Amino acid sequence: MGQKKTKEETSESKEALRQELVEHFREKRDVLRQQWVQQMTAKGLLAGLTQEEIETESMTIYDTCVVCLETNRYEGAQAYATRMAERGVLRGMTTEQIIGGLLTLRDVYGRSLFERYQQDMERLSAALDIYEPVANKILSIVALAFVEEREKIVRQQQEAIRELSTPVLQVRDRLLILPIIGVIDSLRARQLTEQLLRAIRGNRAKVVVMDITGVPTVDSKVANHLVQTVDASRLMGATVVVTGVSPEIAQTLVTLGVDLSKMNTVGDLQGGIEAADRFLGYRVIMEDTAGVTIPKEKV
């Protein structure tokens, strides 16, 4: 029974000290916040922020940390971290600015506790035992939110780059060209197929010229995916003509044993367009005065 009472007393003492810390930080709010802003300014962590933004953000972060300490709950910190990460990443704020600012605030808090309890090392130790886990938790929440937002932005940028790097172009009625440049991995290969099939349906295409001149290498997965793309296009009612197959890729395809029986291949892009015209039933007439080939209407 006595042991239980000791634990209860310890818990009550800890909560009393927690409340004492909260009151201390609220009482010293203006002084400590100004110290924090001055230190961050000296470290160059506030670059790009207006004075109004500095005042608003510093007050919000300071008060959020105190509330987390008082309640031992972190919903407010999580919500603020998400908002701050979104704004920070979009503004191009660095990891040093985000994390460095919170580390500086943690130090300001810690030094203020040392000044308050330096004559009572046992109480100082107990105060730090309460404060430090809260500070570290908030730091980890903000860091994780910032990293996740950065990764989300990077994924969106990669998606945009992939879409731009595999444009499906309509040359003329029922004819599309898909120029592929760069390395093709499994993810890009799937995206390429999806874009192509949507374009075939949207443009009611009958022939697609897939030019892979700008593709340095392919592996077995990508090779098989290209064959599947050709098959899927056929099911959509379009014939695929593959152009620009390099000697290296040709050897790879043969070595891998890829089924090429259903693929129409032509040496270069011009030859591919000419082959596409034949599939579409166009007649090409050489015009002597201009010296160029002009595709005419179907005959």
Image (cartoon, helix red, strand yellow):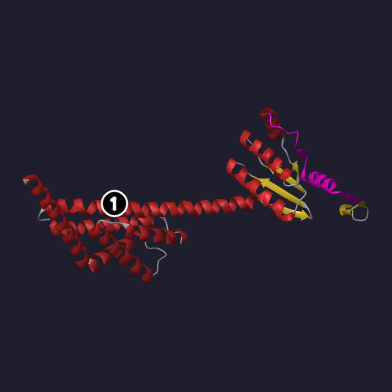
Direction from residue 194 to residue 30 in the image, left or right: left
Residue 44 can be seen in this image = no
Residue 144 can be seen in this image = yes
Residue at (86%, 48%) from the top-left corner?
Answer: 281
Residue at (26%, 62%) from the top-left corner?
Answer: 67
Q: In the displayed image of the protein, which residue is found farthest to the bottom?
A: 52
Q: Position of residue 44 (x, y in %)?
A: 36, 60
* Amino acid at circle 1: Asn
- Secondary structure under the numbered disc 1 in the rendered image: helix
Q: Nearer the viewer, residue 109 or 205?
A: 205
Residue bearing the label numbered 1: 136
Q: Position of residue 201 (x, y in %)?
A: 71, 52
Question: Residue 74 is drawn in which quadrant?
Answer: bottom left
Question: How many labels were placed on the picture?
Answer: 1
Q: Is residue 287 above or below residue 214?
A: below
Residue at (31%, 55%) from the top-left corner?
Answer: 138
Residue 101 is a magenta residue: no
Direction from residue 234 to residue 151 in the image, left or right: left
Which stretch did the figure color magenta?
257-285
Q: Position of residue 251 (x, y in %)?
A: 70, 30
